[in-house]
Amino acid sequence: ILDRLDEAPAAVQDEPTVGQEPAQSSVAQLPAAPEIPSGIPIPEGLDSTGAVLVGDVNASNVVEVYLDYQCPFCQRWESEIGSVLTARALEPGSDLLVKHYVLAFLGETSPTLDPPGPSARAASAALCVMEGEGPEAFTTFSEAVYASADPNEPSTQFATEVMSGLAQSIGVSDATIECIEQERHVTFVALGTQSGFGRGVQGTPTVVLNGRTLENSFADAELLDLARG
């Protein structure tokens, strides 16, 4: 299942310049997210489709987000909308669930993410934080990763020791640090990336709101209303 990753796009969005607006998505309406094949271990805190669940698991409003930590527009989306949306989802009685799918393909040289590049290292570390510390720590860690990103996208970005340092700065356990240093979830990230492209995801950020794939997740009125609460 992993060898089909080489059919995925090599890149999604060019790096934004000052004043540049993100292009509208050309993604058609996506089908339901496929479940991870039986027998594949799923990191704790993820659902059967490989999504990190943040918020009310019984919510009537569900936002699915496909992001790559190396993607400049994802970094911008997180700062403008994502962090507000997840904070809203974590409020008691929010009636909002954000399902995060962490993809890794930008800057990667292998469909199996072997050896792991920047995107894979960051994604694996984020899943370690989710597994060991829970959704609030996951969102805090993700914000720190995006904030630390170098716009020049060097191949050394998101080095494992940097990811460990960011995780330590938010007070994670020794077990979580060990998971990050072992890059324990790289293989699962490769599988999840394949699953996302198999669903029809063609770019990041891709956002699905209550089953509707958004043409422009930076300006969708319904999504912005949810974020504002």
Image (cartoon, rainbow, N blue to C red):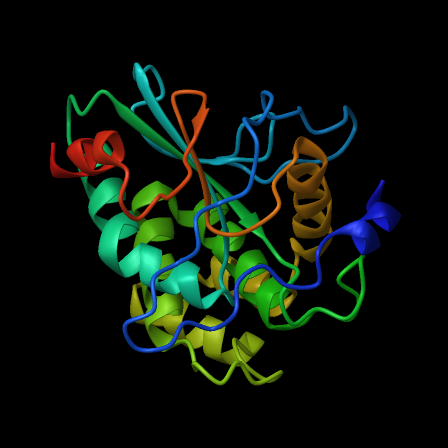
- Would you identify the image quadrant in which residue 93 lies? top left
Identify the residue shown where x is 67% and y is 72%: 117
Q: Which residue is outermost to the left?
A: 229
Above or below residue 131? Residue 122 is below
Above or below residue 36? Residue 74 is below
Relative depth, front residue between 108 and 121: 108
Where residue 30 sits in the image (x, y, percent)? 57, 27
Q: Quadrant of the N terminus?
A: top right
Relative depth, front residue between 21 and 90: 21
Where residue 177 sits in the image (x, y, percent)? 50, 65
Q: Quadrant of the C terminus?
A: top left
Identify the residue shown where x is 42% and y is 39%: 215
Q: Is residue 58 left or right of residue 53?
A: left
Relative depth, front residue between 168 and 93: 93
Residue 126 visible in this rendered orientation of the protein:
yes
Identify the residue shown where x is 36% and y is 42%: 135
Above or below residue 67? Residue 11 is below
Where residue 209 sits in the image (x, y, percent)? 38, 28
Q: Is residue 197 left or right of residue 112?
A: left
Where residue 123 sits in the image (x, y, percent)? 55, 58
Identify the residue shown where x is 52% and y is 69%: 14
Q: Is residue 229 left or right of residue 172?
A: left
Residue 172 visible in this rendered orientation of the protein:
no
Q: Disc count in the image? A: 0
Q: Is residue 133 left or right of residue 84?
A: right
